[in-house]
Amino acid sequence: MSSVMSNKEAVQKTQEKINTWLGENRIVVFAAPGCPYCLKAKNALESVGCTDYKLVNVPSEKDAPVILTLLARMTRKKPTVPKVFVNGKFIGGGNALARLRDSGQLADMVKE
């Protein structure tokens, strides 16, 4: 038996990792250091008192390209960050979170 994973197996393993993050954490932010839209998303969350979220630094993950591809498929958006999920549901990126904050909806979404 080969110790080398097939591409399909690698993708499946990465999908399972994403599913675990989403299943174990109420709020997950997929982000990258130095990304202004990621900072915008985090600031929007923190401005409504939400500081308890899982931050996934995508570039530090060895399977970062696969993570981005899978997130793009899951969200039907471009393979970019940030991608923010609440209770396993995609709610948007930096601009979307700023709009949700400004409308008052974000505070309701992140309430426990």
Image: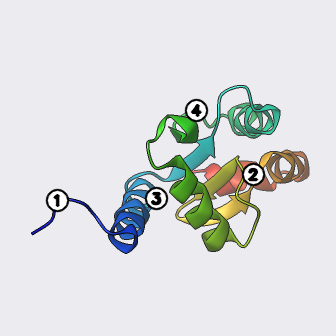
Residue plotted at (39% across, 68% down) = 7
Mark 4 neighbour density, 10 Å: few (under 14) some (14–19) many (20 or more)? few
Q: Is residue 10 left or right of residue 2?
A: right
Q: Earlier in the sequence, mark 4 or mark 1?
A: 1
Check disc 1 and report its element: helix, strand or loop: loop
Q: Nearer the viewer, mark 4 or mark 1?
A: 1
Place of residue 94 in the rendered image (x, y in percent of width and height, measured from the top left): 80, 45
Task: State whether residue 82 is above or below residue 36.
Answer: below
Q: Residue furthest top?
A: 34
Q: Which residue is mark 3?
A: 22
Q: Earlier in the sequence, mark 3 or mark 2?
A: 3
Mark 3 neighbour density, 10 Å: few (under 14) some (14–19) many (20 or more)? some
| Residue type indicated by callout 2 | Leu
Residue plotted at (53% across, 48% down) = 64
Q: Which residue is mark 2?
A: 106
Q: Which residue is mark 1?
A: 3
Residue plotted at (84% across, 51% down) = 104
| Residue type indicated by callout 3 | Leu
Q: Which residue is mark 4?
A: 51
Place of residue 79 in the rendered image (x, y in percent of width and height, measured from the top left): 70, 58
| Residue type indicated by callout 4 | Thr
Q: Nearer the viewer, residue 44 or 75?
A: 75
Q: Earlier in the sequence, mark 2 or mark 1?
A: 1
Q: Earlier in the sequence, mark 2 or mark 4?
A: 4
